[in-house]
Amino acid sequence: MKVLLATRNRKKIEEMRRMLAPFGWEPEGLDAHPDAPEVVEDGDTFAANALKKAREIARHAGCLALSDDSGLEVDGLDGAPGVYSARYAGEEADDQANLNKLIDEAKDFDERQRRARFRCVLALCDAEGRSRLFDGTVEGRITDEPAGENGFGYDPAFIPDGYDRTFAQMSGAEKDGMSHRGRALRALVEAVKLAGVSHRWPSVICCLERVRGV
């Protein structure tokens, strides 16, 4: 099944391709659509941002689009960075700057304050605006110091419950099996299967009509 990923984040595209490939999905990123608009993520929830991106990209490209908005919620920061995870250290901040700010702000936190979770909301939308949301969450804690070279974003600072390693210390396959994005993607694939959708475009439309829309 072909689907356009509403992102230019190469690491995110690579991760989503890796997780969707076993299910027969054929996702492509916006690098194949250089004329696609830059969608401003101005929503106050992950769902609002994901839905806005998917709808605008699906309308522009005239095809099925899949978008995600995700981030880290830290108890000691009252749920921050949350929807501002990608720009926590400023609008032009990169992953390293965001990570550095998080580590600095949490340096005096106790174990309770270090409780955290990664949350992801996916929006699947067609060119007519019909859509469906899927979500995934993984609980854990943030570390005193970053560790690991894999992954991206806050992965070097997050240890999922039941493990003693950060996401950045795990292989891609190991992280995929428990990550917030992996759980949301599996929920999406399962819903499409349950709706009896085939790989043909009209069947995808029918699938979106059968399931609960937004």
Image (cartoon, grey):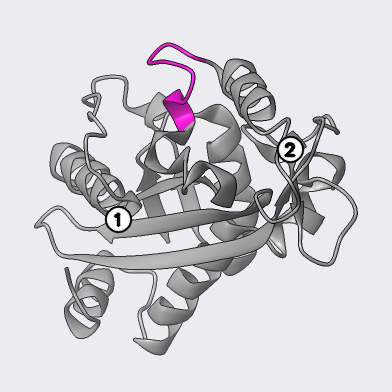
- How many other residues sit within 10 Å of disc 2, few (<14), some (14-19) or many (≥20)? many
| In the image, farthest residue toward the right | 164
* CA distance for labels 2 and 1: 24 Å
- How many other residues sit within 10 Å of disc 1, few (<14), some (14-19) or many (≥20)? many
List the residue tagged with mark 1. 47
In the image, what residue occupies the spot 23% across and 30% down? 39
- Predominant secondary structure, magenta span: loop
- Tell me the quarter of the image containing the C terminus: bottom left
Residue 68: which disc? none
Is residue 98 visible in the rendered image? The answer is yes
Kind of residue at badge 2: Ala
Q: In the rendering, at what x and y percent does residue 82 appear?
A: 44, 43
| Left or right of 41 in this view: 72 | right
Local SS, label 1: helix
| In the image, farthest residue toward the top | 92
The mark lying in front, picked from 2 and 1, is: 2
Q: Which residues are magenta?
A: 86-93
Residue 138: image quadrant is bottom right
Residue 157: which disc? 2
In the image, what residue occupies the spot 77% across and 64% down? 161
In the image, what residue occupies the spot 55% across and 64% down? 137
Residue 205: image quadrant is bottom left
Q: Please tell me whether residue 92 is drawn above or below residue 39 in the rendered image.
A: above
Kind of residue at badge 1: Ala
Q: Nearest the camera: 37 or 205?
A: 37
Residue 148: image quadrant is top right
Q: Please tell me whether residue 153 is drawn above or below residue 68 in the rendered image.
A: above
Q: Nearest the camera: 12 or 71?
A: 71
